[in-house]
Image: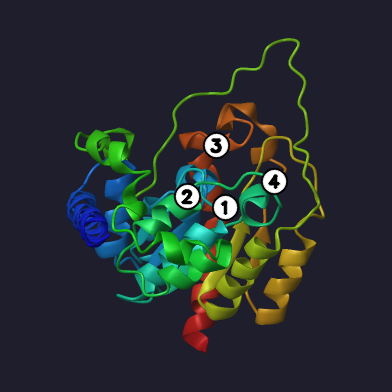
Amino acid sequence: MKKFIYTLLSLLMLVVLGDWAVGSWLRHAFAHTSHDEIGRLNYISDSVTADIVVLGSSRALHHYVPSIITDSTGLTCYNCGFENEGIVFHYALLRQLQQRYRPRLVIYELTYDYDIQFLTWRPASLKHIHAMAGLQCRDSILASVDPWERVSMLSHIYPYNSLAFAIQASQAPTTYDRPEVDNGYIPQFKHMELATDWQFQPQKHNEQVDSLKLGYLTKLIAENAGHLLIVVSPRYLSPEDDIYGQVEELCRMHGVPFVCMVSDPVISRDPSLWEDDGHLNHTGAQAFTRQLVPHIKEILTQNIEK
């Protein structure tokens, strides 16, 4: 029996040491990755100090042109948008950023399915939050999504197990590193092609609200009132929609400006400005950003007057 217990403890010790060794190597490799999506996350977490930052899903990443905002306001701007990510991740990313400094203005691109709607699947939020080792509220955010995360995070490997291959694949420049990337903004240059028999199908939304998402959206709004602008950028041929009423009311309660341009009469009806029905091409992004600038200037002026 003693021999069995000794063997069991030895194996357990080897597992613990192996987990620590592999996990430490993965953490080091992750922290020293400077390309692709992981490199983007590291740069935003560790180095961005822009006066104005843009957060949100791919519609943020491809719709907001920092150079236009800088030219119009005289303030530095960085686009922190992330593909396939919603409010839980972006709340965590902003908190990580705010541990170093506080931007003068945060622009949040609201995307209904990622930020409000209940989905049977969850976006990739947790895999990136797992790896945000310096985030002071990381464990509480993870536990709010799944209480078992506190147990899983005892492993040193677990935070990186879904990113191990991505770490290796991120050692060479990719789309995120192209010369035309503008302070985090990634332009798209294709034009949407409409077949002769193509008929637009309005986006259908499940009206069931995800309480977790709404909770983090509420925290984002309440904690950043006075330095936050919530925006819904155009969507191709989108009709006026009342699905944003709850968000509009939240913004009103906390004195946060809410700008809904989803059905802009010019941009949303011009197919030459779109790569697909949800994402503007570079020409469209430039047109949208220029239209948004007066709203940005207004909130900056209000902040100075306060």
Kindly identify the amino acid type of the residue bearing the numbered disc 1.
Gln
Furthest residue toward bottom: 306
Classify mark 2: residues with Cα within 10 Å, few (<14), some (14-19) or many (20+): many
Give the colour scheme shown: rainbow
The residue closer to the viewer here, 115 or 259, is 115
Q: Earlier in the sequence, mark 1 or mark 4?
A: 4
Looking at marks 2 and 3 on the same chain, the residue that comes earlier in the sequence is marked by 2
Q: Are marks 1 and 4 in contact (CB under 8 Å)?
A: yes
Residue extending furthest toward the top: 196
Q: Report x, y in % for residue 28.
A: 17, 54
Percent position (x, y) of residue 305?
51, 87
The amino acid pointed to by label 3 is Leu
Q: Compare marks 4 and 3 and give the one earlier in the sequence.
A: 4
Type of amino acid under label 2: Tyr
Q: Nearer the viewer, mark 1 or mark 3?
A: 3
97 over 186 or under it: above or below: below
Front position in the image: 167 or 296: 167
Label number found at residue 280: 3
Indicate which label's residue lies in the foreground, 2 or 4. Answer: 2
Q: Position of residue 4 (x, y in %)?
A: 26, 55
Residue at the disc numbered 1: 291
Q: Left of 45 or right of it: where is 55? A: right
Residue 169 appears in the figure: yes
Quadrant of the frame with the N terminus: bottom left
Q: CA distance from mark 4 to mark 3?
A: 13 Å
Badge 1: how crowded within 10 Å, few (<14), some, or many (20+)?
some
Q: Residues within 10 Å of mark 4 (few under 14, many from 20)?
A: some
Residue tagged by mark 2?
A: 64
Above/below status of 264 relative to 144: above
